[in-house]
Image (spheres, rainbow, N blue to C red):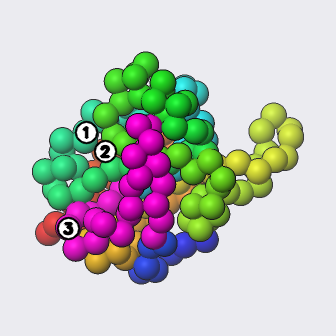
Amino acid sequence: MLKVGNVAPVFVLPDADMDAVDIAAYRGKSHIVLFFYPRDDSPNCTLQATDFSDHEDEFSRRGCVVFGISRDDCLSHAAFRDKHGISVRLLSDADGRVCKQYGVWQLKEVDGVKKYGIVRSTFVIDKQGVLRFVLYRSNAKGHALEILRTVKELNT
């Protein structure tokens, strides 16, 4: 699992429109928030994605871009985005490579059944590419405002 102070792993993933997003392109330009979520259109994932979208302008004013990542494919992301008016870019990690790099692909127990899945997690990466905030097992409700406070601290 990653820790504050680690250099954030770089990657290229497609977004909901199948456009490639190269995380390294933001170095020196923007802070980055990555929130990993289990799946499109589930209640908590919807709450989290819409909450980040509701505050996207505030993140942007602080020099920060926000990306949501799950293993759902681009078409699922597009339908999810359009259905709920999500404005943050949703990235598809269909093969799970980035989920493994960030340590969010973990054994979970759901309704008494153990299986691997994405643990809801959030990372704040500064403009130099260093992790400044790492949270595994985050809650969906109110999480975007918590992360916004963290981003504000980066700018002071």
Q: Count neighbours of disc 3 (C-alpha within 10 A) and say few if under 14, some if 14 to 19, many if 20 or more.
A: few
Q: Give coordinates of residue 100: x percent, y percent.
A: 64, 63
The residues bearing labels 2 and 1 have C-alpha atoms spaced at a distance of: 8 Å
Callout in the foreground (1, 3): 3
Mark linked to residue 55: 1
| Residue 46 seen in render | no
What is the three-letter code of the residue carrying label 1? His
| CB-based contact (under 8 Å), mark 2 and mark 1 | yes
Mark linked to residue 145: 2
What is the three-letter code of the residue carrying label 2? Leu
Report the magenta residues as a range: 10-33
Task: First in sequence, mark 2 or 1: give its number.
Answer: 1
Q: Give coordinates of residue 110: x percent, y percent.
A: 77, 39
Q: Quadrant of residue 144?
A: top left
The residue that label 3 is drawn on is 29
Task: First in sequence, mark 2 or 3: give its number.
Answer: 3
In this rendering, the answer to whether 57 lies above or below 47 is: below
Callout in the foreground (2, 1): 1
| Residue 156 seen in render | yes
Q: Which residue is rendered at x = 24% and y = 56% of the image?
A: 64
What is the three-letter code of the residue carrying label 3? Lys
Q: Is residue 38 left or right of residue 36?
A: right
The residues bearing labels 1 and 3 have C-alpha atoms spaced at a distance of: 20 Å
Mark 2: secondary structure: helix
Q: Which residue is rendered at x = 62% and y = 48% of the image?
A: 94
Q: Quadrant of residue 26?
A: bottom left
